[in-house]
Amino acid sequence: MTPTRTALGLCLFLSSFGAVHVMQSQEAWPPAVRETPEKAPVLSAEESMKTLVLPPGYRVELVASEPMVIDPIAIDFDADGRMYVLEMPGFMSEPGGGNSREPINRVVVLEDLDGDGAMDKRTVFAEELVLPRSLKVLDDGVLIGEPPNLWLYKDKDGDLKSDARELVADTYGRAAGSIEHNANMVFWGLDNIMYTSEHDWHLRMRDGKFETIPTLSRGQWGASMDDAGRIYRNVNDAPLFVDFVPAGYYARNPNLVRTRGLYEPLISREDSTIWPIRQTRGVNRGYRDQFFRPDGSSITIQGVGTPIIYRGDRLPKELYGDAFITDSTTNLVHRYKLIDDGGGRLRAVGGYERGEILASWDERFRPVNMLGAPDGTMYVVDMYRGIVQEQLYWTDFLRDYINARDLERPVHLGRIWRITHESTKRDVRPSLSKATPQELVKTLSHPNGWWRDTAQQLLVQRYATS
């Protein structure tokens, strides 16, 4: 039995980055573990920021908070750097912790109008969604996964509000599937295949049309890639896997039972030591002492999500190519360094001997997703709520813990944070929607992976041949 299952894992362009910045803890790093107060107070974004702790030189800045963003679970950017946010207010919104199957979820567009790094404008792009799972911004629309359907929503008049939608596939997961186990993610890879997680097909464009590609179902929450195009995923309390070989090669032979090179673990759960800065017994199997230190902090990952490989250019070079995962149940973001043995085999080790790239004393800080951003930093999606474990899997221990600490309410909050560094410099705002094919080709050598990836995707979608 695993320690817990997390509910969601489902990512400025400024110099000193003028977004809201509140003085954060000045304690020695890493700080000591704090005892859990009797209740879990609901903090404002500014108050919660004071509980966030990063290594020396790093800091976190507020990009958006409620009511600008509500119940965020995933983000993506368009070619001009506008942020699309998938909001899921239907998650655990019913009395007693049930999910709402009502069409109350949405995708919104957030814009920073004055260039200070904080979002100023909110536009509802698509609404009346039932427990949507994935979000991918394309050149001529936005893919939204709403099991069992994968839709392409289109904005025909440029007002950032969808006017029409087209059905891409009606086999994207199960309508009645649980939050934790259903198709999710649409991630565009270096090979121009759009990868999914916990699903049996991927997607690609051919001659301007979408087609599905059979594959082996792998992963649970999200996906990412490195500069070599290798795909990374994770599941539950197993933090990081990599595909050395594309899964499609194995799917061709139904009699092949071994898939060496596919979904290979890079580190064991036992070796993946984490360092929360608060007591973290509020997980599904918090009664199992072997998973906790005497101070009450978890020793190992409890509910992993969001592998991303940092490929930006505005944080220290030591982070480039490292993997980052969220563990919303223990209120932290964990860093792994990837070690190549010289023959192409990889393994992961903790990024710090002790400590985390981002951790919080606030029990309601729930990092469920991350993304490398156009500004070269990393964005953290914080659903900010008391519960992230789907009720279907609650143990009696967790139910009692939730009731004792009044964690069911409130809901419908949320924050998006930016991890920066004291060395972070200002970057230009992207404007790739108007770029010529020649300009896009030049962008393929940009030092920030987001710019390279976006340029490639635009070239493919626009059939550029010149």
Image (cartoon, helix red, strand yellow):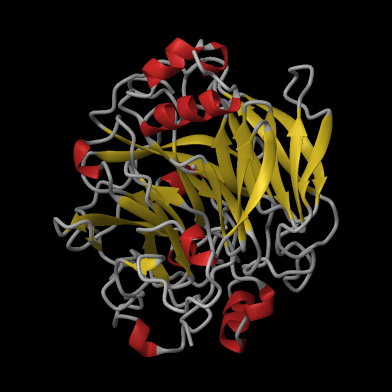
**Camera-side residue of 317 and 171:** 171
Q: Residue at x 37, y 33 (%)?
A: 449
* 383 lies left or right of 367: right
Image coordinates of residue 28 in percent, x first then y, are 19, 53
Q: Does the image show residue 85?
A: yes
The answer to whether 67 is drawn above or below residue 387 in the figure is: above
**Camera-side residue of 310 and 38:** 310
* 87 lies left or right of 343: right
**Camera-side residue of 265 and 383:** 265
Q: Residue at x 54, y 20 (%)?
A: 80
Q: Residue at x 72, y 24 (%)?
A: 160
Q: Residue at x 56, y 86 (%)?
A: 397
Q: Quadrant of residue 400?
A: bottom right
Image coordinates of residue 418 in percent, x first then y, are 42, 38
* 434 lies left or right of 300: right
Q: Does the image show residue 44?
A: no
Image coordinates of residue 454 in percent, x first then y, are 48, 28
* 225 lies left or right of 179: left
